Amino acid sequence: METQDTNAWYQKTWLVIISCIIFFPVGLYALWKNSSINKGWKIAITIIIALIVIGNLSDSKKISVAEAAEVQPVSKTNPSATPGPVDIENEKAEAERFEITQKLKARARRDWPDDYSTQEFWVNQQLEDYEYMLTVEDNSIKSKAQKDWPLDFSTQKFWYNEQLEARERMN
């Protein structure tokens, strides 16, 4: 029977754990050499580390959001320029348009399941009317239309224009 050296670095459980976290190849070696750690724990930790390594290998082709931000130029005219107020506003508008588009698509799928041409027509009409509502003057009529029909831009547009025409007739 082999005698275990209790002074060996791999017999210190705390050092084995740190080695598994910081430098897993050495940590795995130490884990299996350590006599005080149960075999079930050794197997479980080895499987977890293997899954993490495999998961990282499959994700190596994906780019993180932070990396994408570094790769993407800030400005099309001057990539080294810091974003100005116009750039920030454009990014906000794009993000808002994307979010609205996703909500409209979800609503279209709910209202017309399996009728893709109707979904497409309705979403495109709503986006066109959304763009129109962005161009109209901010006033109490627009605010009421947006409040009463928050995700129905065609109704907002219709009601807004009807209110303006009625206001003109009343003057």
Image (tube, rainbow, N blue to C red):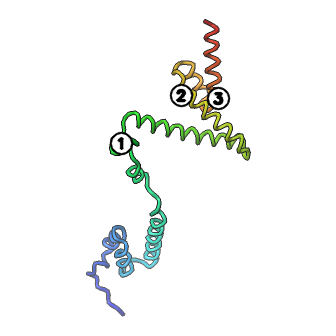
Quadrant where the image shows the C terminus: top right
Q: What is the secondary structure assignment of the residue under circle 2?
A: helix
First-in-chain label (3 vs 1)? 1
Which numbered circle lies on residue 154?
3
In front of the other: 163 or 84: 84
| Residue occupying the far bottom of the picture | 1
On screen, residue 115 versus residue 153, left or right, reads: right
Q: Whole-percent x and y of residue 103?
A: 60, 40
First-in-chain label (1 vs 2)? 1
Q: CA distance from mark 3 to mark 2?
A: 12 Å
Q: What is the secondary structure assignment of the residue under circle 3?
A: helix
What amino acid type should be assigned to the residue bearing mark 3?
Answer: Ser
What amino acid type should be assigned to the residue bearing mark 1?
Answer: Asn
For discs 3 and 1, the disc positioned in front in the rendered view? 1
| Residue occupying the far left of the picture | 7
Query: Eyeballing the image, is 9 above or below 142?
Result: below
Name the residue that disc number 1 marks.
78
Whether residues under marks 3 and 2 lie with C-beta atoms below 8 angstroms apart, the answer is no
Name the residue that disc number 2 marks.
134
Which numbered circle lies on residue 98?
none
Crowding at dot 2, Cα within 10 Å, few <14 / some 14-19 / many 20+, comes out as few
Q: CA distance from mark 3 to mark 1?
A: 38 Å
